[in-house]
Image: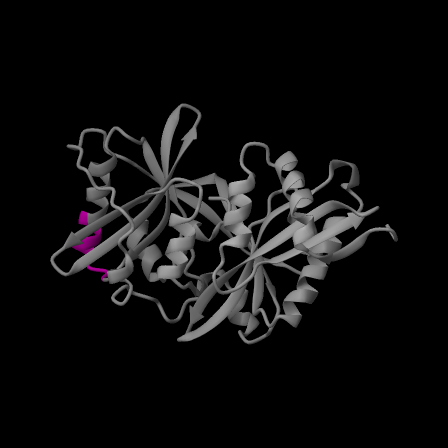
Amino acid sequence: MDEIAIKEYDIGERGACLELLRKTFTGTSDEATFSWRFEMMSAKRPLMICAKHDNRVVSFNSWIPWEFVYNNTKYLGFQSGESATDINYRGMGIFSKVLRYGFKIASERGIDFLYGFPTEMSYGAFYRAGYYPIGTNYFYVRQINPFKKRLKGSVNFSANHFLDSKLIEVSKITPIFDYDYCKWRYIQNPKDFEIVEYTENNGKAIFFFRKKKWKWLTELILLDYQINNYNEMFIKNSIGFIDKVFSRKAFYMRTFFNEYSDKGRALRSFFPMRIKSRFYILCVRPVSKRIDNNILLNRNCWDIMPHCVDEL
C-alpha cells in the first residue's frame, strides 16, 4: 500500500483511465461517454483522481460539476460519477483513499459539497469517507394508457425561450436548469433522449425522457419535468398528453422526486405505484460549510429528479 500513489488526473493518463473504465463497464463506458463527461464542460472542469502502482493506473474516480441554487444563492456541488478499481487491487482500501483525496482537492477548489448515488458495492467506501446517506429515492411508476390515440410530441431542443419563465422552489436545493446545462446534459450526451413539450394557453411543460428496456418491456425514465405553473388541470393535461405521445411505444414511465417539494406533490398523484426494489440512495459530503448541515443533509430540502444521476 505504501507504493500506491494517489494524485489528480493528468491528460497523459487518459488512455489508461479510459481502458480501466471500459473493462469495468463493458458496453456502457467508451470514448464518446468519456469525452462527454470530462471534456465538454465549458465553464468548470471535473474533479478526477487516480491511484497508481508501478506507474500504472489501478483506480479512478470522477466528480462532475453541477450548479445548484438555494434561497437565490448559487452553490457548486460535484457528483461522484464513473469510478473503477482494477480487479487485482480491490479490497485493499484504495478506493476509500481516492475518495478522501478527492475531498482534499474539493476543499482547495472551493467546492460547496460532494454528492453521489453509490452502488451497493461502493456504498461502504463512501460512508467511511465521510458521506452522509441522507435519503432513499424510490422510483414511482405510471402505466401508459395503450388505448390513447397516438400523437407526435417529440421535439428538437427548444427550451431556451422557456428558461426565464420556469418555476424554481427557492426553499429547496435545486439544480440549475439553463441553456448550457441542457446543451451538455441532453444534446452533447451520446445517449439518446426524448424531449417533449406541452403548451396550453400560457402554460408550458417540458419533459425529458430516456427509453430503456426492462426484460421485454419498453420503459420511459422521466429524467426531468420543467414547468411554468402548478395549475392542477394543466399538470393533468400535460401528463395525459404524454400518454398520447407514447401510447403503445412504451409500457410505463418511472421517476423519483422529493414528495415534499412542489414538483413532487404535483407529480405524486399521477405516479400511483412506488417500487421499493428500485431506488438510488443520495449521499452528501459537506465541504465549504456555506450551507448549514441542517439544510444540506436533509433530503426534504432537495428538489431532485433522476437527471441528477450521472449514469441515466
Q: Is residue 93 visible?
A: no
| In-image side of 212 versus 291 (left or right) | left
Of all residues, the one furthest to the left in this rendering is 201
Q: Position of residue 147 (x, y in %)?
A: 18, 29
Number of numbered labels in the structure image: 0
Residues in magenta, as a range: 229-237
Which residue is located at x 26 percent, y 54 percent?
Answer: 158
| In-image side of 29 versus 172 (left or right) | right
Above or below, 3 relative to 150: below
The dominant secondary structure in magenta is helix
Which residue is located at x 47 percent, y 65 percent?
Answer: 67
The magenta stretch spans residue 280: no
Of all residues, the one furthest to the front in this rendering is 12
| In-image side of 6 versus 73 (left or right) | right
Above or below, 31 relative to 127: above
Question: Relative to the observer, which residue lies in front, 30 or 153?
Answer: 30
Colour pattern: one colour
Which residue is located at x 45 percent, y 72 percent?
Answer: 74
Q: Quadrant of residue 169?
A: bottom left
Which residue is located at x 34 percent, y 39 percent?
Answer: 253
Of all residues, the one furthest to the top in this rendering is 216
The magenta stretch spans residue 236: yes
Q: Position of residue 134 (x, y in %)?
A: 55, 58
Q: Is residue 193 visible?
A: yes
Question: Relative to the observer, which residue lies in front, 83 or 130?
Answer: 83
Q: Position of residue 121 (x, y in %)?
A: 66, 42
Q: Position of residue 199 (x, y in %)?
A: 17, 53
